[in-house]
Image (spheres, rainbow, N blue to C red):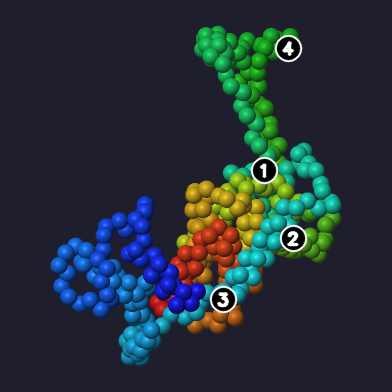
């Protein structure tokens, strides 16, 4: 709409000659020229000046933009030797996080889909330990034999009813009396002269038998001059057998860690996965408390188990389950921070001197990335950055 047409429309709407109607100006207004600059003498002239000045006002007002001119950055002094060092870029890149989260979501979808080789679970044999057996699960993941993670259950002792206990108390006197009779019968001294069957062994016969057995044993004992030789066994053969026994006993048992295969994962649901992830949090904290014990090592096999168990967790979880996952992520952050402090204290190269079987930083970032991205715990990235930078600055 042009300016001229708009002006005509405004003049038409504000015309004083229109008939008063509902919704329009109903008060009388003086009909004066636009060049009137006198002092209004009545209400008609005052309304005229008010409407004239209102038409001259702009329809839109604008405030000056305070950010129109860019601010000049304030350059501070360069950090000196006594000032804290600037924080390093210790977190994975945004591109890595986005790519990993997309692939992890696809892995979750593929892991829950049935394949053409669907196997019905066999309930007769035990595949894994019970959910509440934490120590047995550690042995199971370490690849220990079934006898260690599936020990035979102790037989339950039958419960004694009150009636049996009452009868047992009543029969205590009779049982004691029978024992006394048996004792008296065994100490019978009057043996018959005709060589009949004795009612019990006498002290004389017991002493004679004891002396005879003692003398026979004394005669059979070897003496320094008459020690019997071994029954035709050469010294070489006996030494060889002993050395073989020593070699067999000294050979360590090699245990291959168990992997989270689809056959095992079909038995694990959301609740089971959350419970096992809680165990891994405990084991990582135990490793941080006792870093010198090799039996508490968190291996790459454990990292694969944690990654696979996270794929079994539902998309929507409760606050308590969210807290458990956050504790797992913080345990991984603490594990990386402790490793950085140890490297800095021992002047180790990050790429050298690390056991390939131990859970590395890449595996920790995968666990943290899955928890932060899948369940919206993005504030853990800030906690990880602060914790790792403090560990490196302290060293």
Residue at mark 4 to residue at mark 1: CA–CA distance? 52 Å
Q: Can you give x and y, in whole percent of width and height, for residue 115 in the image?
A: 81, 53
Q: Name the residue under label 3.
A: 93
Taking 341 as reference, is 141 left or right? Answer: right
Q: Residues within 10 Å of mark 2 (few under 14, many from 20)?
A: few
Report the residue at 25% width, 79% height from top.
35
Q: Mark 2 points at which residue?
A: 248
**Sequence-first tag of 3 and 2:** 3
Mark 3 or mark 2, which is nearer to you? 3
**Sequence-first tag of 1 and 2:** 1
Report the residue at 15% width, 67% height from top.
41
Mark 3 or mark 1, which is nearer to you? 3
Residue at mark 1 to residue at mark 2: CA–CA distance? 25 Å
Residue at mark 3 to residue at mark 4: CA–CA distance? 99 Å
Determine whether the residue tagged by mark 2 lies in a helix, strand or loop: helix
Residue at mark 3 to residue at mark 2: CA–CA distance? 52 Å
Q: Can you give x and y, in whole percent of width and height, for residue 105 in the image?
A: 66, 61
Determine whether the residue tagged by mark 4 lies in a helix, strand or loop: loop
**Sequence-first tag of 4 and 1:** 1
Q: Name the residue under label 1.
A: 151
Q: Are marks 3 and 1 in contact (CB under 8 Å)?
A: no
Q: Above or below — where is 208 with respect to 16?
A: above
Mark 1 or mark 2, which is nearer to you? 1
Q: Do the residues labelled 4 and 1 touch (CB within 8 Å)?
A: no
Q: Which of 170 and 354 is in front in this view?
A: 354
Report the residue at 53% width, 81% height from top.
348
Q: Residues within 10 Å of mark 4 (few under 14, many from 20)?
A: few
Give the number of the disc on residue 197.
4
Mark 2 or mark 4, which is nearer to you? 2
**Sequence-first tag of 2 and 4:** 4
């Amino acid at each position: 709409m042009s300016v001229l047409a708009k002006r005509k429309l405004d003049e038409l709407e504000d015309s004083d000659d229109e008939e008063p109607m509902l919704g329009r100006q109903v008060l009388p207004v003086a009909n004066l020229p636009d060049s009137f600059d006198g002092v209004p003498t009545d209400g008609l002239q005052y309304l005229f000046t008010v409407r004239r000045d209102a038409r001259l006002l702009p329809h839109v007002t604008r405030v000056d933009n305070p950010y129109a001119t860019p601010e000049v950055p304030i350059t501070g002094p360069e950090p000196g030797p006594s000032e804290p060092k600037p924080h390093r870029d210790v977190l994975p890149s945004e591109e890595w996080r986005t790519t990993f989260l997309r692939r992890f979501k696809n892995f979750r979808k593929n892991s829950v889909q049935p394949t053409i080789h669907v196997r019905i679970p066999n309930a007769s044999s035990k595949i894994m330990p019970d959910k509440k057996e934490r120590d047995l699960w550690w042995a199971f993941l370490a690849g220990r034999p079934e006898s260690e993670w599936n020990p035979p259950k102790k037989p339950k002792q039958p419960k004694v009813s009150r009636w049996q206990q009452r009868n047992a108390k009543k029969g205590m006197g009779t049982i004691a009396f029978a024992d006394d009779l048996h004792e008296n019968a065994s100490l019978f001294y009057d043996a018959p002269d005709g060589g009949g069957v004795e009612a019990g062994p006498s002290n004389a016969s017991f002493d004679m038998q004891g002396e005879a057995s003692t003398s026979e044993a004394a005669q059979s004992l070897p003496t320094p001059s008459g020690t019997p030789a071994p029954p035709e066994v050469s010294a070489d053969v006996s030494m060889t057998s002993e050395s073989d026994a020593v070699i067999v006993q000294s050979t360590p048992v090699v245990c291959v860690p168990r992997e989270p295969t689809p056959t095992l994962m079909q038995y694990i649901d959301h609740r089971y996965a959350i419970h096992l992830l809680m165990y891994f949090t405990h084991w990582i904290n135990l490793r941080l408390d006792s870093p010198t014990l090799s039996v508490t090592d968190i291996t790459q096999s454990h990292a694969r188990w944690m990654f696979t168990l996270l794929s079994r967790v539902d998309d929507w979880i409760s606050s308590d389950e969210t807290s458990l996952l956050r504790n797992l992520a913080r345990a991984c952050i603490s594990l990386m921070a402790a490793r950085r402090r140890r490297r800095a204290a021992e002047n180790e190269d990050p790429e050298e001197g690390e056991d390939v079987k131990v859970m590395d930083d890449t595996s920790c970032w995968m666990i943290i990335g899955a928890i932060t991205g899948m369940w919206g715990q993005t504030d853990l990235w800030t906690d990880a950055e602060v914790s790792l930078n403090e560990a490196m600055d302290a060293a």
